[in-house]
Amino acid sequence: MPLSAIRGQIARGIDIIVHLGRLRDKSRKVLEITEILDYEDDVIKTSTLYRFNEEGEDENGKIIGRLLAKNPLCHTEKLMAAGFM
């Protein structure tokens, strides 16, 4: 199976990617939420929906931050079909 066909199957099979990461305080946080938009010319096109913004540390050295909205969700068909919108 050609690599482009495999990439296309991955792009069509995944709607949202949630990136978890370990920060320097050893905590795990959601760092980014990304929507898969399309697969075209051997490139998977994505859109960042939310990104973690580090705002500092508390008195115990724990990282303080929050997810900030970056772009709106484009593909809402599945949510509408399930009654969420």
Image: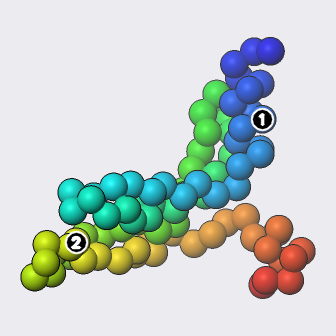
Furthest residue to the right? 81
Q: Position of residue 15 (x, y in %)?
A: 70, 55
Of residues 77 and 40, the one drawn nearer to the viewer in this rendering: 77
Q: Residues within 10 Å of mark 2 (few under 14, many from 20)?
A: some
* Residue at the (71%, 49%) spot, across then down: 14
> In screen coordinates, is 2 left or right of 50?
right
Say what amino acid the circle numbered 1 marks: Gln
Q: Which secondary structure lies at badge 1?
A: helix
Of residues 61 and 47, the one drawn nearer to the viewer in this rendering: 61
Q: In the figure, 9 relative to 35: above or below? A: above
Residue 52 makes an appearance in the image: yes
Q: In the figure, 18 relative to 79: above or below? A: above
* Residue at the (64%, 57%) spot, across then down: 16
Q: Position of residue 19 (x, y in %)?
A: 48, 55
Q: Where is residue 32 in the image (x, y as percent from the top left)?
A: 45, 60
Q: In the figure, 71 relative to 44: above or below? A: below
The numbered disc on residue 57 is: none
In the rendered image, which residue does mark 2 sit on? 63
In the rendered image, which residue does mark 1 sit on? 9
Figure quadrant of the N terminus: top right
* Residue at the (47%, 68%) spot, across then down: 50
Question: Residue 58 occupies which quadrant of the picture?
Answer: bottom left
Residue 48 makes an appearance in the image: no
Question: Residue 74 occupies which quadrant of the picture?
Answer: bottom right
Say what amino acid the circle numbered 2 marks: Ile
* Residue at the (60%, 33%) spot, across then down: 43
> In screen coordinates, is 43 left or right of 28?
right
In terms of sequence position, does the residue under pointer 2 or pointer 1 come before the other?
Answer: 1
